[in-house]
Image (cartoon, rainbow, N blue to C red):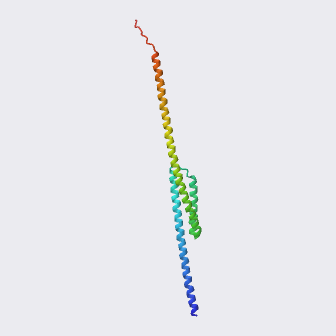
Amino acid sequence: MGFLKLFMIILFLSTLMSSSAELAVCESTRETGASVIESAEKSVFSAYQAVLEAEQVGANVSNLIGQLNIAGELLAQALILYRTGDLDGAINLSNLCYEMGVAIRAEAHKLRDVTIEAMGQRFRLTVLVSFGFISSIVCVSFFGWRAFERRYHRKILRMRLEVGSNES
């Protein structure tokens, strides 16, 4: 009987320890899930800010906004799964959302830089074309004035002076 009591006590203690270990593992998984979801939220927010910056410089961000909406939907689904207890599903969706946020942010920065460069090129082209037109107007005006001046001088030189008499 002593052996049976000892066996029961050991069995009870091992069951108690394993349930507390499972509880610790479960709590650790919950904390991991919460931190992964938080990272995904930060990633989506930073992607949103990058898309906003790209839009402010005039970039066409309609495609990025669509991707950002998809990332937001994935994040919402991950939060729902986390709250219902499906931690593995929540972690998988959060990781996918995080990766989408990073990709959207990189694309937004690239698009912003391309748009800024295109704006600079358009500005330089506008300055060159304006300089060309202004130079053309100055040249046409100068040569037009010279032609008018020559014609005027020729006309004056052809005139004959007549002296009129004052006979009354």
| Percent coordinates x, y for residue 161 in the rendering | 43, 12
101 sits left or right of 168 in the view: right
Image quadrant assignment for residue 94 = bottom right
Which residue appears at 55% of the width and 74% of the height? 26
| Percent coordinates x, y for residue 92 in the rendering | 58, 66
| Percent coordinates x, y for residue 42 in the rendering | 51, 62
Image quadrant assignment for residue 11 = bottom right
Q: Is residue 43 or residue 137 the one in the foreground? A: 137
Q: 69 above or below 131?
A: below
Q: 60 above or below 36?
A: above
Residue lying furthest top:
168
Quadrant of the frame with the N terminus: bottom right
Quadrant of the frame with the C terminus: top left
Q: How many marks?
A: 0
Q: Is residue 81 or residue 130 the one in the foreground? A: 130
| Percent coordinates x, y for residue 153 in the rendering | 45, 20
Which residue appears at 51% of the width and 41% of the height? 125
Q: 156 above or below 64?
A: above
